[in-house]
Each structure stands twice: as C-alpha cells, then as structure tokens.
Image (spheres, rainbow, N blue to C red):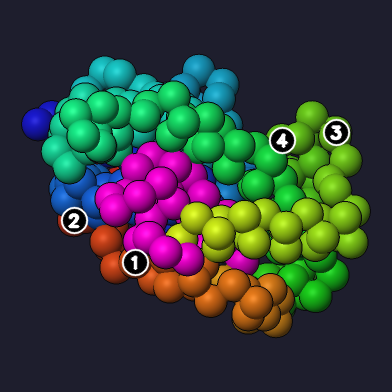
Amino acid sequence: MPDIYLHHYPNSPFAEKVRAVFGFKNITWKSVYQPAVMPKPDLITLTGGYRRIPVLQVGNDVVCDTALICDVLEHLQPTPTLYPSVQGQTSKGAERIMAQWADTTLFAAAMAYNFSPKGAEHFFAGQPPEAVKVFAEDRKAMRGGAARMHPGDATAAYKSYLRRIASMVDDQPFVLGAQPTVADFACYHPLWFTRRIEPIAHIFEPTPSVVAWMDRIAALGHGTAVKSSATES
C-alpha cells in the first residue's frame, strides 16, 4: 500500500470519521496536523485553494471530501469492508444515503447544539476573546455566511435524531446490522464531538444504546498513526 497522509487536527469531527475508518481497517497512516483556522498556507498549496479538513493524500492524489475518502480507503484496503453483504447482497444505496444524511442534517444539528452558549463556554475556556472571535469568523466564512441553526431548534432536532439512531442500535450492534458500515462512521463523528464537551453531553442520557454503540466504534481505534509534517508529505 502507498503511504497515506491525513491532514487534520485533533478536534475535527470529520477528521475523526476518517481516523475511525483507519481503525476499522487497521491502516497505518501518516498524521499531518494543520491549523484549525485560516491561514493554512501548506494545506492551500497542496489542495489548490481547498481549506476544509480533513484532506487525504495518497502519492500524488489529493482527496478532499470524506465520503470520497472513505471510498478511496475501501479501494486501497477492501477488507474489512465498509459495505458488508447480507446473504450475498450489499446495501450500498442505503448505507450511502444514511451517511449523506449524517454528514449534512445530523451534523448541522449536532454542531449547532455543540456550540450553544454552554457548549461554547466549555470549548473556549481559557482562550482569549480574540481567539474566539477569529474562530467564529473563520467558521462563518466556511459556511458562506449562512446562519447556524438556533440552539433551541438544534437541541430539539438533535434529540429526535438520537432517538432514531437508538431505535437502530437497541437490538443490534451497529446502525444497519451486525457489522459496521460507512453509515456508522458518518453518524459517529458529530456525536463524538458532543461527548467531548462535558456540560452538554447529558443529551445522551435518554439513549444509552447510542452511548454503547459509540463505545463500540471508539474501541476500533485509529489504526497506527505515524507523526509527519506538511513538508514531508
């Protein structure tokens, strides 16, 4: 297998999605930390202007979207697969649709909840006001100026989505059955971020099966990471 580089930073939810896939597939990879906010000169040079995290680099190929990154990793390391078959048939359509829902609808509600006043206070604790302002302006620019969901609306939606995920994992280990699929990793990463913010993690209390499922994903690890740098990649 060629060298695999992941350009990321520790608190990135979408990077955690890819790191968890590395763990599932037991991949050895090179970890390149990039800044959480602009400027990102090394990343911009690599991608030709794309600024989001994570970015996968395999040889001369640069892959910028996590849905596509998952497909590239599936090609490089087919087993264990992100698209397991049941009785000889795969359900790639259902898995991809659920993953897309998680990466968009679920993610938007989760992050609006995560950065509600109580969550933001905990996340930015100890940081100067200037740093908080820079982060907020950076994320606003990333959204193209689009408004974030109101915290109250986000909380209601997020609770509803957690109940839906719970209904899937109450009686089976993973969201679509006995084995992890790409849908599990897409659903996992925004929830992983919430769980790291202690004052708001109580939202999981009504859905203990979701917590148990998250523990199963977390137990897969992150594969084998080797520290690297942008100049080496």
Q: CA distance from mark 4 to mark 2?
A: 31 Å
Q: Which mark is residue 142?
A: 4
Disc on the earlier residue, 1 or 2: 1
Residue range in magenta is 170-194
The answer to which quarter of the image holds residue 124 is bottom right
Q: Secondary structure at mark 4?
A: helix
Q: CA distance from mark 4 to mark 1?
A: 32 Å
Do residues under tags 3 and 1 come within 8 Å of each other at their CB atoms? no
Please name which of the two marks, 1 or 2, marks the residue nearer to the observer: 1
Q: Secondary structure at mark 1?
A: helix
Please name which of the two marks, 4 or 1, marks the residue nearer to the observer: 1
- Residue assigned mark 1: 216
Q: Which mark is residue 224?
A: 2
Please state which amino acid type lies under the numbered disc 3: Gly
Relative to 222, residue 74 above or below: above
Please state which amino acid type lies under the numbered disc 1: Arg
The 10 Å Cα crowd at callout 1, few under 14, some 14 to 19, many 20 or more, is some
